[in-house]
Image (spheres, rainbow, N blue to C red):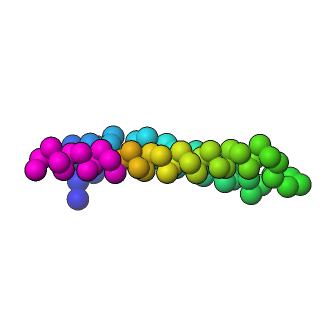
């Protein structure tokens, strides 16, 4: 296996970049939520829900882009 990513790997990473960023934001929100002292605030709950929703939106957008690309080929 080569040390450097192939152009196909780089293209896949680029396609998934927005989803990856949303997932990182979700992990950040989860960490804040789980480490909140003495308990999570309403703001922590809202951040967590927003981060979850962002991941879902980006996942749907990624699937839609994939399905459109299949339709273009067919």
Magenta part of the chain? 63-74
Q: Is residue 65 left or right of residue 53?
A: left
Residue 56 visible in rendering: yes
Q: Please name whichever residue, 7 or 12, is drawn nearer the observer in this view of the structure.
A: 12
Compared across the picture, whether 20 is left or right of 32 comes to left
Horizontal side, residue 32 vs residue 63: left or right? right
Q: Name the residue located 67 percent from the left edge and 49 percent from the top edge.
A: 48
Q: How many marks?
A: 0
Q: Residue furthest right?
A: 38
Percent x, y of residue 70 = 18, 50
Along the line of sight, which residue is nearer the eye, 54 or 2?
A: 54
Residue 4 visible in image: no
Residue 12 location (% of width, % of height):
29, 47
- Could you say which is closer to the camera, residue 22 or residue 45? 45
Residue located at (49% from left, 42% from top): 21
Query: In this view of the protein, which residue sits in the foreground, 49 or 22?
Result: 49
The residue depicted at 58 percent of the width and 51 percent of the height is: 52
Residue 32 location (% of width, % of height): 72, 49
Q: Residue at x 27, y 49 (%)?
A: 66
Q: Main secondary structure of the magenta part?
A: helix
Where does residue 16 sit, x and y in percent of width and height?
A: 37, 46
Q: Residue furthest left?
A: 74
Quarter of the view holding residue 14: top left
Residue 68 belongs to the span the image colors magenta:
yes
Q: Quadrant of the N terminus?
A: bottom left
């Amino acid at each position: 296996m080569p040390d450097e990513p192939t152009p196909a790997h780089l293209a896949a990473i680029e396609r998934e970049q927005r989803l990856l960023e949303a997932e990182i934001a979700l992990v950040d929100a989860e960490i804040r939520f789980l480490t909140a002292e003495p308990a999570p605030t309403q703001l922590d709950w809202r951040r967590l829900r927003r981060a979850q929703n962002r991941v879902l939106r980006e996942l749907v957008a990624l699937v839609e882009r994939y399905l459109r690309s299949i339709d273009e080929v067919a």
